[in-house]
Image (tube, rainbow, N blue to C red):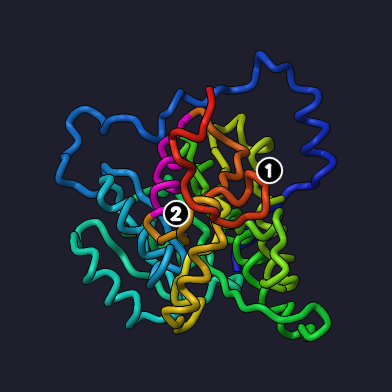
Amino acid sequence: MRRLLSGPLLDSVDRRLLTNSRQVRRQPFNSYQSEPKKGADMNDNKSQRTAIVTGAGSGIGLAVADALVQGGLNVVLNGRSEDKLARAAQQLGRPEQLAIIDGDVTRPDTARRIVEGAVERFGQIHVLVNNAGIFYTRPFTEYTLEELDSFLGYLRGTFVLSQAAVLQMRRQGSGGVIVNIGTILASNGVNGLPSSAPIAAKGGIMALTKNLSTELAKENIRINAVAPGVVPTPLYGELTHEQLEVLHTMQPLGRYGTPKDIADAVAYLVNATWVTGVILPVDGGVDAGGDGAYHGSIEAGNTAA
């Protein structure tokens, strides 16, 4: 199997420190979003930007794929179930902009297959959205090591797939974008949602976002994350009307989020060319503080300038 990353760390650091900053090759501004070259066929999907979205069969991943397709990108859909991805692709339409590569991102060999398949189908890779994951709550002392390992597999999968994508972006020489999907629970614990094991993985992904954003900035590869609040998706299972009503009250804005709310934020980060290293809360106001509860609207007559 081809190695995804090589080279002695210390030698690499020494070379960077000894290189005069004026000799460092600067990436062309926003080059990954540049117009197709003169003479390029606008009907040729290889002249468009291409994104990989993991966990794209439903929920947030499907909404992200839809937003990117609507924005004119080619999208490679990844997930464990080929049948589920086929249904998602049918729902999205525009088959000329889509490709399906099924596989478990927690397995290291899947990263290579996804990247190679995307390049074979569309020529290049410009955007990676690391969305795949699992989530369920349990008291801290009741999580088993096997369960912890299953969550951490998605941290490892994010790491390895990002490595493979960055190597391809580096070969292309025109920058790129990675958007990771974290969670607001990594920075704002909720007593009613004991979730230490999945948050250990999501917290690692959010820390990786910050670290990589500085390391890769000189190559115009931007790394950001979205930190969703409560967004009922298939990961939550079947919820009753009463449970959904309770979820509404957990956000200052008075409603839980939707997959489209998260997809809109991802689309913004994909196109925000001067933004990197950001973990964007999309949580109905929970990250702003307070008790995180909705208390209704304030009458205009009771406010003061």
Q: Quadrant of residue 64?
A: bottom left
Residue 265 lies within the magenta run = yes
**Upstream in sequence: badge 1 or badge 2:** 1
Q: Secondary structure at mark 1?
A: helix
Query: Amino acid type of disc 1?
Result: Lys
Magenta stretch: give its range: 261-273
Q: Nearer the viewer, residue 80 or 241?
A: 241
Q: Of helix, strand and loop, which mostly describes the magenta segment?
A: helix
Q: Residue 250: x and y, percent?
A: 57, 62
Q: Quadrant of residue 19?
A: top right
Residue at point 25% right, 46% down?
A: 72
Residue 112 appears in view: no
Query: Amino acid type of disc 2?
Result: Ile
Q: Is residue 30 above or below residue 59?
A: above
Name, please, the residue furthest toward the front: 301
Q: Is residue 114 left or right of residue 42?
A: right
Residue at point 56% right, 70% down?
A: 133
Q: Image quadrant for the N terminus?
A: bottom right
Residue 219 appears in view: yes
Q: Is residue 240 above or below residue 40?
A: below
> What number is the disc on residue 262?
2
Residue at point 77% right, 38% down?
A: 12
- The residue that mark 1 highlights is 210
The reply to whether dot 1 and dot 2 touch (C-beta < 8 Å) is: no
For the residue carrying disc 2, how many other residues have a C-alpha within 10 Å: few (<14), some (14-19), or many (20+)?
Answer: many
Residue 40 lies within the magenta run = no
Q: Residue 246: x and y, percent?
A: 52, 71
For the residue carrying disc 1, how many other residues have a C-alpha within 10 Å: few (<14), some (14-19), or many (20+)?
Answer: some
